[in-house]
Image (cartoon, rainbow, N blue to C red):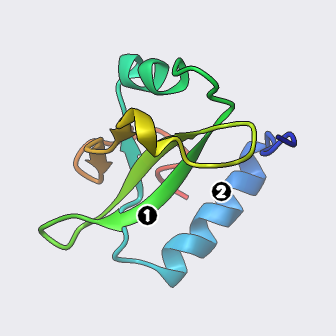
């Protein structure tokens, strides 16, 4: 698997978030997941990454589904650990975060 992802500076992140929220004002801003669930997801054998899917729940609210991926960038769905159900922002946000207020 190639190295995927990069760290960006806060000013750049704020610009990207503002663009997204302008284009999709009704979509969920973010979700928070408990560390233990993230650790369990990435501790699966052969896990090399995480893919994040956009989804809509039963109430029509946008949310996210996380799945581990292997070294060939394939979703590891055979382990049946698909993480979703994080607490969504705006209900559970860091009101002081510059990312929330971008």
**Figure check: 2 above or below 17:** above
Query: Residue placed farthest to the right in the image?
Result: 2
Label annotation for residue 54: 1
**Figure check: 81 above or below 52:** above
Label 2: how many Cα within 10 Å (few below 14, some 14–19, many 20+): some
- Which residue appears at 80% of the width and 45% of the height? 4
- Which residue appears at 79% of the width and 39% of the height? 7
Front in this rendered view, residue 23 or 51: 51
Residue 38 placement: quadrant: top left
Q: Describe the element under mark 2 as helix, strand or loop.
A: helix
- Which residue appears at 13% of the width and 67% of the height? 58
In the image, residue 88 lies at what x, y percent? Answer: 29, 49
In the rendered view, does 91 fall on the left or right side of 71? left
Label annotation for residue 32: none
In the rendered view, does 72 fall on the left or right side of 49? right
Label annotation for residue 14: 2
Label 1: how many Cα within 10 Å (few below 14, some 14–19, many 20+): few
Query: Residue placed farthest to the bottom in the image?
Result: 23
Sequence-wise first label, 2 or 1:
2
Gap between marks 2 and 1, in whole Å? 20 Å
């Amino acid at each position: 698997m190639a190295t995927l992802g990069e760290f960006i500076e806060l000013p750049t992140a704020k610009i990207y978030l503002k663009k997204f929220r302008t284009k999709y004002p009704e979509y969920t801003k973010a979700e928070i997941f408990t560390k233990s669930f993230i650790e369990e997801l990435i501790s699966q054998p052969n896990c090399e990454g995480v893919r994040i899917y956009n989804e809509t729940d039963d109430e029509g609210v946008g949310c996210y589904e996380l799945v581990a991926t292997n070294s060939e960038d394939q979703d590891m769905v055979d382990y049946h650990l698909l993480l979703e159900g994080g607490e969504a922002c705006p209900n559970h946000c860091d009101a002081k975060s510059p990312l929330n207020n971008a």
